[in-house]
Amino acid sequence: MERVKEIEELENAIRRLTPRSAAMRKRAFEVLPDGDISAARKFAPYPFYAAGGDGAYIWDIDDNRYLDCCMVFGVALLGHRPPSVMKAVAEQIENGPLHYGSPFPGEVEWAEKFTRCVPCAERVVLCNTGNEAVQKAVNIARAYTGKDKVAKVEGGFHGSNEYSLWSVVTHPKFMGPAERPNAVPMAPGMPAAAADNMLVLPFGDEAAFDLIEEHASELAVVMTEPVHGPGALTAGADYLRKLREVTKRNGVLLLFDEVITGFRLALGGGQELFDVVPDIGLFGKALGGGTAIGAIGCSKEILDHVMDLTPPLLVAGTFSGNALTLAASNAFLDHMIANSPQLQNKLSERGDYLRSGFNDFARSRGLPATMTGLGSMWQLCMADAPIEKPRDLIKVDEEALHEFELRLRLKGVFLAAHVHIAFLSEAHSDENVEQILTALTESLEETFTGRSN
């Protein structure tokens, strides 16, 4: 009961700081589903409504400023309003329309840069979001292999579609045995046919290789994230190399969902960092430079084959590769090409410093908390180490995590809702990282010692 009372007081403190956001939230409930455009933007007692952002900071309509560690869920790899991207967007707005009804040179220039950066990409298909890229990539895999079944890894997230919303969150009652997880729907409306064509693989377990071999005759593709979004967990390079060998030997395509890891872990994403080249790579988020984008990279052999089928793969989309998006993305790619790998190395150093500082503090105080992650990606878990697999997240103390997040927000640090990982960006300075670490450790100690904010 003491924690419940503490949480109530913290939520009331947030309400006092954000009356305009509270009023806006009431209006949102009248016109949006449960008041939200995206469930990822849901916070207790309510989300703040943003008024601006620059560099490593975001501020709300009540004039509160926050050090941003959400960074648009990984989109803002360069920080808010990166100068080169803003300049390119302004020039496109001033000199041309936002979109054309015909090809334009910027799309060819963009594709040349993208394929130069990404190891698996000899051809690239452009679309509007990572979610759309998943759907089109599965079509490519099915068309190429002539098989229907799709495998995903337990705890992985690949957008809000019928190939992703299975077993994203591990549920003790329904998840089944560790070596053969059940396909558990994460949303209503998931078709039975999707479940019939879905295979869920255990995370980081060689039992997954047995399942792939068992279903090879019907399995088109295995989807995995080099670093899992929920939990910021990775099975490691050796496991990914074995996965690559097993899928290739069994005639199954391997797909890396690099919507989050793309360009962040390395210029070529996780496939470059881990030195494992998949058949298909998916990209989004940071690639758009702040605009909506999705991209599918694969070999000439795969894409040319599906384009030669009757009927061929349909490559279409009114807003795919629009001029405004590609102005931003071309500027982003130029910046990354010019500054890699120094940019990623610096971000990794700061991420390692943050993780070691937090975990050392929690361990020295005997507090049940762990920070996971890799490079500039990180997530906080109110549970003792180790947190190595999605099923380890079951032991997280959700109530303590909620209190911790409230305290952190009152200290001016903005994290995404705890189901999502947090990020550092190029705009975060060493001083910012120190400020974040101080806020994290103070909030952690206060959460478990009961001190009021």
Image (cartoon, helix red, strand yellow):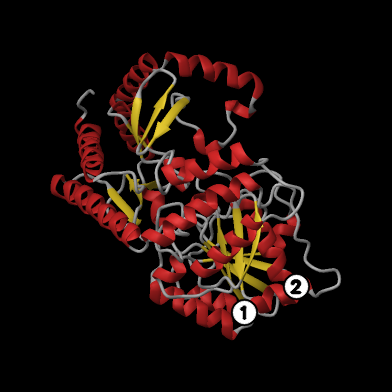
Q: Quadrant of the C terminus?
A: top left
Residue occupying the point 66% across, 48% down: 322
- Coordinates of residue 197 in the picture (x, y in percent): 70, 64
- Coordinates of residue 316 in the picture (x, y in percent): 76, 56
**Amino acid on which disc 1 is placed:** Glu
Say which residue label 2 marks. 306
Say which residue label 1 marks. 214
**Is 156 left, or right, of 421 in this rendering?**
right
Which of 291/371 is in front?
A: 291
Question: Does label 1 or label 2 sit earlier along the sequence?
Answer: 1
Residue occupying the point 23% across, 42% down: 437
Q: Is residue 281 visible?
A: yes
Q: Is residue 179 visible?
A: no
- The residue carrying pointer 1 sits among few (fewer than 14), some (14 to 19) or many (20 or more) residues within 10 Å by Cα, namely few
Instruction: Determine the secondary structure under disc 2.
Output: helix
Residue that protrudes farthest toward the bottom in the picture: 249
